[in-house]
Image (spheres, rainbow, N blue to C red):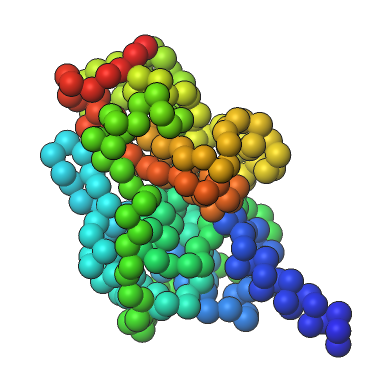
Amino acid sequence: MKLLLTLLFSSAFLFASSAFITPDELRHAMNKEKIILLDTTDTATYNKGHIPTALHVDINDFRHKEKQYQLMNSPQQIQKVARSLGINQDSKVVLYGHNKPKELLKASYIAMALIANGLKNVAILDGGYPEWLFHYEGFTSTESLPVKKGNFRAKFNPNILVDLAYVKNHIGKVPMIEARPLRFYNAQAQSKGVRRLGHIKGATSSAWADKLDNDYCIKPKKELQSIYKLDPKKEVITYCTGGLEASMNWYILSQHLHFKDVKLYDASMREWGNRDDTPMEK
């Protein structure tokens, strides 16, 4: 009996404290926890097969267009979307993609949006749907279940997102890391929708994909720490082309490695790189 209680407690604690969870951890928790599973793929792919009870979620419900870039929606809008997905104050939300381009980044951005608005328990399925199929090939669904409206109350944390003025004022004072592939950072290629080449003055390259293995599973923590080479007690700002790539760096640093003060420049290079009054270098 003591062993059983210990295993159950350990499983609950592991889920509550893990930013990335394995298919086995998810499968075990699905029978015991108030889990909301969110699938970030396109509707057609979702309809062909997904994890049982998973709901389809659209990244566009969490962002709005502002000039040539996008920003996180208001707390009121995110609260409305969260409730429509059945999310309550005590829900445990797990996001995953099917490992198509950008799906993992959609998961990290939605996770950030929910966390920034006060949801305490959010995780990403390590390796996504392909990893789930590897472990539980027969345990899938094509059904979309009805949703009971949730009671989530958004409480926005103003210390996560930063704007252009904040970034300008902190150049040379705070480490800034760019999540785009190195070729964009080095001005060897031009990001879509970004006029100027190069990166924010003083920023270092830290491509989001470098933190994952070929199967889209997160690398070991020690390896991640050696990649980032950052002080977990100090502030860091992450940015990219338009917010999605940077959200993965934000998620890993703040939720997985437990850095104390990680901020994200949401408008990123689609704002910064299309102005002439922002300091850049190649």
Q: Position of residue 202 (x, y in %)?
A: 40, 20
Q: Position of residue 50 (x, y in %)?
A: 49, 63
Residue at the image point whose x is 86% and y is 80% from the top: 3
Does residue 94 appear in this view?
A: yes
- Quarter of the image with the C terminus is top left
Compared with 270, 6 (above or below) is: below
Compared with 34, 174 (above or below) is: above
Q: In the displayed image of the protein, which residue is found farthest to the left?
A: 67
Compared with 247, 168 (above or below) is: above
Q: Position of residue 129 (x, y in %)?
A: 55, 55
Compared with 101, 179 (above or below) is: above
- In the shown orientation, is residue 123 left or right of residue 275? right
Residue at the image point whose x is 62% and y is 81% from the top: 32
Residue toward you, 13 or 99? 13
Residue at the image point whose x is 63% and y is 67% from the top: 15
Residue toward you, 145 or 186? 186
Residue at the image point whose x is 59% and y is 55% from the top: 20
Residue toward you, 80 or 230? 230
Residue toward you, 218 or 27? 218
- Quarter of the image with the N terminus is bottom right
Q: Position of residue 135 (x, y in %)?
A: 68, 59
